[in-house]
Each structure stands twice: as C-alpha cells, then as structure tokens.
Amino acid sequence: MASASIPVYNSSVNPLENRSSQNASRESLKMGPLADVTLLPGEERVIEHDKDIIYMCPFNGALKGKVFITNYRLYFKSADADPAVTLNVPLGVIGRVEKMGGASSRGENSYGLDITCKDMRNLRFALKQEGHSRRDIFDILFRYAFPVSHGLPVFAYLSQEKYEENGWNVFKPMEEFRRQGLPNEKWRITFVNETYELCDTYPTILAVPFRSSDEDLRKVSAFRSRGRIPVLSWIHRENQAVICRCSQPLVGMSGKRNKDDERYLDLIREANGTAKLTIYDARPSVNAVANKATGGGYEGDDAYQNAELVFLDIHNIHVMRESLKKLKDIVYPNVEESHWLSSLESTHWLEHIKLVISGAIQVADKISGGNSVVVHCSDGWDRTAQLTSLAMLMLDGHYRTLRGFQVLLEKEWISFGHKFASRIGHGDKNHADQDRSPIFVQFIDCVWQMTKQFPTAFEFNERLLVTILDHLFSCRFGTFLYNCESARDTNEVRSKTVSLWSLVNSEASSYQNPFYTPECSRVLYPVASMRHLELWVTYYIRWNPRIRQQQQSPVEQRYMELLALRDEYLKKLEELQLTDSSPNSSHLSNSSTPNAASPTQHITHLHTPF
Amino acid sequence: MEFSEHIKTANVEDVVLRRPFYQPTKGTLCVTGHHLIFSNRGGDSARPFLLLLRNIDAIEKRPSVSSGTITLKCKDLCVLQLDIPGMEECLNIASSIESLSSLETVSEMYPFFYRPPFLSLQDQWGLSSTEQHYAQMKEIHDGWRVSQVNRDYSVSPSYPPAVIVPHSIDDETLVKAARFRQGGRFPVLCYYHRETGTVIMRSSQPLSGANRKRCREDELLLQAVIDGSELGYIIDTRSSQQAQQARMTGGGFESKSCYRGWKRLHRQLEKGKVLQESLIKLVEACGDQSHSVDRWLSKLENSKWLSHVQTALSTAGLVAECVERDGHSVLVHGSEGTDTSLLVSSLAQLILDPDSRTLAGFLGLLEREWVQAGHPFQQRCAHSAYSHVRLRHEAPVFVLLLDCVWQLARQFPLAMGFSEPLLLRLAKEVYASDYGTFLCNSDQERCVTGVKERTHCLFQSLLRANERQHYSNPLYERTELAIWPSIQPPSLQLWKGLFLQWTDDALHLVEAQKVIQNLVSQCHRPLNEKVENTDG
C-alpha cells in the first residue's frame, strides 16, 4: 500500500528491471471511471460526456484517462495507472489556461492544454488533434474558471450546500468588542461609517477614542490614505494598551501636516497614559519616503512629538508575489535537489516570513509593556493586517481557539478590507494583474510557524490552515469573496452564499488539535530566527509524492486513540470495581487485552499527501 | 601513574561558572582525576555541577594579571566558561584539564572507576551474543551456521569471536577468504529477511590489487549466499573510481567475471576527514551567535552535513529495496568495512525490520552492528567538532547514523519504540561516558583491557525500568511494514535537538516537545503495566 510513495533510491542505474507489476484491481477501474465523484449540491456538469485525455503527470508520466468539468471543478481519473491517479481541482484554483502546441506540433503529447494553478501546481493535458476536443475543453474551462470575466456568477452563488451551523454568525462585531471590554470610559463605539461614507473599505462599526467626536473622525479621514483612519483593533484587558490600525498619512512631497490627525493620535496615546505612542510603519523606510512622491508618507518627528516611529522593513505585495513565484519554481514539479538550501534562501520567502513575525513580536511586546501602538503600511490592508492579527494571536488566547481564529480572520482581514478579490483574482482571467499577491497565504504560513513552535497553544490543527487556503481560491464559499464589506453588502454575500465556517464548524472535531491546552493569558513569543523557521512543506510541496514531510495528523490520530483507550480502560476498571469489590486480577487484564490490540490495525503514518 | 601528578591546584574558591540557560554562579571549583566539580557556595540545595573531563574537546585560556578565564568547549557541543581568580590558579587548572582530558590509556578512563549503587559488575555485559542472536532466528538454521573461526581473533582482529556464515562454507574456507579481505573481514550475515529469504551481508574490500588477484574461497562464500537465486547485489560505498584506485594500494572490488551472479553498484559515502570537517563546519554555523545570521541556509548547505545524511539514507534505501522488493541478497562494503558499511547495513535493517525499531531491538542492533562488529569508537570519537588538535582518525560516523535514525523517526513518528532523548543520550555517551560500551576499537581490545569485567554496559543500564520509560516513544505503534524514508532535500531537516541544543531559542521548543510527550505519556499511565509487557 505504501508503494506509490516509495522514493526512488536508484535513479542512475536500474537493477530492478524485473519489477512485477501488481494490477489485481485493474478490472474494477474499467467500469464507469468517473462514477465515484459526488457532486456538491448545486454543482452541474458543463461537459456532458467524459472526455478522453492524457494527463502529463510530472511524477508518473503520461496517464490516459477521462476528464469532466462542472461549474465547480475539473475532475480527472486515470484509466491504466494502479492505483488510479485522480485530480480534483476546483476551477477557482485555476489562474491561467493556455493552449500548447499547434497543428504542426510533432512530438508525442505536445498538443494540449497548460493550466497554471494558484495553489503551487501546474497541470498539463495532452489531447488528440482530431475533432475539436481541445477547443471545446479550452472554451469551457476558460469560461467557467473565469466566470467574473464572462459576466457569470462564481460558484458560491450557485451552491445549494446546507450545514447545521451558519458560519455567518461566527463574527458579530459588537460581541467581539464587548468580549474585549469595550466600550469603556476611554473608548467608544461609533456608527459613523454605517453607510461607508467615512471610509468605503472599512467595516461599519468602529472603536475610537472616547474623546474624539465623529466630526474629528471625518477630518482625520481626509488626511489618511483612502480615509482609513486609526481605529482600535485590540485592547489589553489589564494595562489598557491598544493596537490601532490605519493607512499612511497624506504627507506628500511638501510635508503637509494635519492638526486633527496629530491631536487624534495623541488621544490614542492618552487613553492609557502611554508616554510615547509607538507607530509601527511596516514598510522599509526607503519605501515610506518614496511614497511621499505619490502623496503618501509617514508621521514626521516634528509633527508627532509624542510618538516614536519604527520601520519594520517588510516589503510590498510585488516583492512577496515574486518571492513565492521563485519558491514555486524550486518545488514544482521537481524539487531543486542539488542546491536545495541555497535555492530556498535565494527565494527569500523565509526571510520575509521572519520579518513579518518579528514585526508582530515587536508590536505584541510593546503592548505587553503597557504601551499603545499604531500600525500602518501604505493602505493598511496588507502588511498591517498581517502585523495586527499576528500580534493579536500572540497576545490573546481567544484567537487561538477554533472559533476565535475565525473571528480574527473575519475581523482583521475580511471586515477591514484586505482586498481578497484583487489579491487572489477570484474568477478573473487577468493572470498577470499586478494587484495579485499571496499576502494572506504568507500570513497563514506565519500562523503555521507559530503552531509548530507552540504545539499545545492552538485549538485548531494544520488541516484547518490548509482548508482555509484551499477555499481561499476555490470560490465554493462566500467568505473570501470581494475586497471589502461594502462590496459584500451590495452583492448580498451573507444571504446568497455559504460561509466557510459553516463547513468547518459542522465538522469541528476534524479541525481540532488534541494537544491543545488552553492558557489564555500566556503571551506567545515565537522564535523568528532563520534557524527555527521551516518551509511549510506539507502545504507548498504537497503535490509531490516523493516528499514525505512530517505530518502532524498521524501523531494527533494516535494520541486520540490512546486517549480513547485510556478512557475505556478507566471505565472498565470502574465497572469492575462496582460489580466486584475485590477484583480478581486475571479477569481485569483479560478484559482490556483486546483494547490494547485494537489501535495497531491502523497504518496511517504511511499514507502520503495524495 | 597517579592522577594527582596532573593536579597542581585541586581547589579554587570564588570561581564564576557561565553555562547555557543558567545565570553565572560563584562557587568552588574542584579538579579530580576524571571530573570538574563545581559547587555553589551559597548553601542552596542544588547539586554540584559535574563535568566529565573526557567530555572536554578544546580548552582556551585567557589569563590576566590577577585572574583568568577558561573557555571549555565540550564534545557534547556545550560551551562553558570559568572565571578564575588568580593567574597561577587559572594556569594550573587549565593545564590539569589539558592533560587529564586527553589521557589515552583505556584502563585509566572513568568507566573503570564508575560504580553506581544500582548496577553490579556481576551483571551480564552486553545484551546478547552472536550465538544468542542466532538461536533466536530459527528460520535461518538450515542455511546458516555460527562459526567460531575467529575465537582467538586471529582471523580478523576486529571481528567478534563468533559470526554467522552460510552452512555450506567450512572454517577452512573462511580462513582463506579472510586473507583475501582487508583486516580479515570476510562477508558475514547481518540480516535475514523472512519473507523473501534473502540476506544483507557485510565485509571489507577484497584484496584483488593491481594484478587482479582472485580468491576461490571468497568466490565460493559469496556463491553460497545466492545459491539457488540468480542474482545478488554488491553495494560498494565508494565511487567506482575510488574502487579502481584502491587496487593500486592492494585493495579492490569484486569483478563481474569472478563473481557470477553478483552485480556491483557504487554509491559514494564520505567518511573520515571529509565527514569530520563537515561536522566542524556545521557546528561552527550553528554556534554563530551573531543575531543577524543571514545566509544561514547557505552555511548549512556548505557544511554538506545534510547531503551526507541524504546519501546514507538513500544507499540504505537502495539496499532495503533490493532485499524487500526484488528479493535479492546484498553485500555491503567500502574499504575497511568498519564505517560506512555499518552505517548502511544498520539503516537498511531499521527500514526493513520492525524488531530493530523497538527500544531493546535498536540497542541490540547497535551492539551487533557497531560495538561487536568493530567500529573503532576510540579512534573515531577521540575528538569532536571543537578540537584544535590535528585530526587523525576522527570521524562522526556514529553521529551521522544517529542523525539518520532521527530523520527516520521524524518521518515515521509512530514507528520507532524509542524517542529523541535516547538518540541525544547516545550522541553524548559515544564521546564521553561513565560506561564502558563505547571504549576501545574492537571486541578483542575490550577483552584485553577487561572492559567487560570492570566497566558497566550502557545498553543494559538504558533498559532499566525507569530509564526505559524516559527513552520510550509514547506514540509507538508497531508496524510490520518497511518504512521507506523520503530522501528529497525538503524532507530532511537539521537535527536541532542535537546541533542547536545549547542555544536559548531552542529551549522553549524543547519544552513544547516535553509537554507533548507528557500529555501522551499520561494516557499510558493507567495502562502502564500492559504497555511494559507488550514492548519487545
């Protein structure tokens, strides 16, 4: 059973020519190859018949099989390979579809389709030149993989899925503020943005200094890029230090000042008597200066005398996009073997992760010390969201629970207008769009690094993180659609689509970390040293069957078996003590022997990511 | 000779000790024949800090007018510092440490003086003998026998007195075959695969030399191994070029024409100086305390340590693949047959054999394949990564084995009956130990110096009930299947538990691991009596 995953130890010489092929189950594959997929409610085939196609698998070579396409997925199953190779690709994952080869193409299997996916893989199919099978598949894929470009709805609007839980109820802004102890005598809740007038990319409900009027807020919004004024994200229960987030001030080349903005930041400082308000500008200082040319900038010393400004040197979305692209180049389809570590280093991916995490550590550390902070970058929806949400994860145990983490994402990312639609390009054919960037993937990677370093501190497991990233692209749920709340309102996302959290919370146990030990008040400071950061192999290289990364799941599964075993044993023991006041020892050991043997049936740790 | 000759100053007051994870403490330093003892004056109940002098790899002294500083770099990779008042005291202490830590007479080493109350010299030394091992494997009794041909170590000075060989080969043939193998290390059995009936053998290189000498007895011996099946594989742990060159110095390889049915494959595994230098580079990169450790991954790559891990695992995988999936017997050898051959054969057994993956089974494997099989521990582990002494025979082959085993355990977290702390303990003990297990270079030397009568056996001690629990993997779930490691570079990781164990950053990661271990162990608690019975 482990055969599909056995690495090849002997690539240069092959002494093992006479390998006996085991094709016992081949018969069963011949009948109805694609009958075994269950379509989602609302999912419909858009190609009526299964098409013959060759999947150019980078690991197993060319595989003949059949393919069908629905309004949600592309499904392929090989006909000959044993075990069968299947592909189950949500169309939302597809970033680009290209034709390869033309009428004059010579080489075998050189005529077909090349599909670039957003989840670190590419798919290549070869087709016969006769008939118009390629044109048909290409047209259909192009139309359904990029519905937005064709005026069609994304699948989330067609889905008829029903779940016990309604995930849209997970995050209620007022409840979350109340949990944090707000409003209080220093901070008030304002509905000034109820109709998105103040800021069209902010949520409707905001927490602001008690002493600032709504009129003040309007004035401040004029001086902040896209009206994204400093508002409270999180408050420390004991020392009342706060994390505020915003966009850059519109200082410009002339070095403009704004009295209202200056006074407003001072109100934030005053709220808990912070001596000097720390402003974390996520950008490298050079970039912050350069932004002045386009009207932006940073808080100068003269204007903001009670504040200190710290640059965190995190690069922009373009740098991150290129970095992940380089990473993909060295892991897919084949891992760059000869200089793996230096190649990995030259992608700078881990270095970027390090800078984001160490920035968040600085924020969390300031807050723990009782000092309020303001975090921004340029627009305050990429790096800012990374920093505030990671710092909140370090500071507040609630966000480390399964539901608390959902609240954190809903709050800091979704409601505060991380531009998911632009960054991911949901349903959009424009693959080269400069607005695309894996900022959210990078954030989830940082969370994963933390879960690795603190294996008992998070209620959720790695599977949740991978599931979130899968549905970041899939368009099956409404959760990550659109750029901001106002767009979500206009398009009635909450009433017309299903939330990802409906799926997750309806089967919560499979996303839970059995080692979780709640310690709400503990502040987690991860190690942000390059020596302790790891590449998230289980995500980035999961398509490669030759990689057997350390998977947490068998360990979790085994632990749960052991727990069950213990409980059963204790129960038996109790029963015996109840029925027999002087338990006879041979009886006792006999009764538990079958239990001790039962978990050895599993061989889960030999499973591969496939 | 008296140890006291080396000790000019036995006690110094007001010494400040600085070591990882502890605040600097002031106390009394005492030098004995085998230890540095540091006791805290403050009268607090903490036990004195004990450092085996043998553990010290390098010593650096910086004396000044009224005091001095001694930096001790240990073989377990820990770095300590002593601030000693008085220049003369400082120099005296330093010279005592220098001479006492490099004593080379085996019978003067600490294991000959270590007498803990919980162990008795009357206990059996070692876990098992060749005869006992053979007796347990009933299924091989038809085709294989125990030969005592080396009972007086005259055939091969580095082999144990008894070895397992094909039934049809008599001792006379063995004696002749041994003359044709370097160090007399003729092919012997190390693993029998029940399902396919094939075996893993190991030996040293044949002495075919420049004029392609042959030895009929050696050929007969190998012929007997694959009797009936048509093919066997010789995995030579040198490149084919190296094997060719070895002929010029009297060594060589099995030529196709002389060994019919045997096919040779070359897989170059580094050993000796190359491996030692790799370790030195790695430890240097790990110890770089500057916080802007940029280019860390490049430094890690430049050390080449992980590529040695990769080659070792992939060669072992190849051996296991030949045996399990293709049903062919394998002979492994390099040149001496005391380093890379042992590495490959023991890793292949771990991949294939569930019995070798239990705590007791693993220690048994180490005893058979390393201690009895004559890995020259004393030469290989005389110094570790810090020493300034000119390298002679040092090479961290055993540490490389432990690292590979750690990688296997990481990829198969349920398959091993033992845990990372065991591997860490072994990595420390192999360089400096209270026990006699890793003393000397061969079984013969151990007999001559009385190691088996006058020291305690580490493996025995590790299997005592309370130690056993500490070193067991609470997640262990026996699998009968082979565990095929992935050897792709992203699947292999730096063994932080060993190489970064003394850095502050590693501390909370270790703590986290302990918490997990404890959680799992807690579910065993009510079941404990059962678990002990089922662990084989």
Image: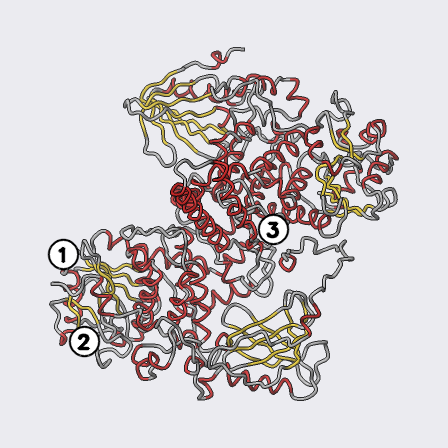
Q: Which residue is mark 2?
A: A191
Alpha carbon separation for disc pair 3 and 1: 58 Å
Residue neighbourhood size for the residue with mark 2, other residues' Cα within 10 Å, grouped as few (<14), some (14–19), many (≥20): few
Alpha carbon separation for disc pair 1 and 2: 26 Å
Give me the residue at 51% from left, 24% from top: B434
Q: Which residue is mark 1?
A: A273
How many labels, in total?
3
Give me the residue at 49% from left, 72% from top: A118
Q: Position of residue B391 (x, y in %)?
A: 60, 31
For the residue pair A485 and A25, the one nearer the viewer reads as A25
- Mark 1 chain: A
Alpha carbon separation for disc pair 3 and 2: 58 Å
Residue A234 vertical position relative to residue B133 in the rendered view, above or below: below
Q: Are marks 3 and 2 on the same chain?
A: no
Q: On the picture, is B76 further left or further right than A266?
A: right
Give me the residue at 53% from left, 36% from top: B533
- Mark 2 chain: A
Q: Nearer the viewer, mark 3 or mark 1?
A: 3
Q: Which residue is mark 3?
A: B485
Residue neighbourhood size for the residue with mark 1, other residues' Cα within 10 Å, grouped as few (<14), some (14–19), many (≥20): some
Q: Position of residue A191 (x, y in %)?
A: 18, 76
Disc 2 marks a residue whose amino acid type is: Phe
Q: Quadrant of residue B63?
A: top left
Q: Position of residue A405 (x, y in %)?
A: 34, 62
Q: Quadrant of residue A387?
A: bottom left
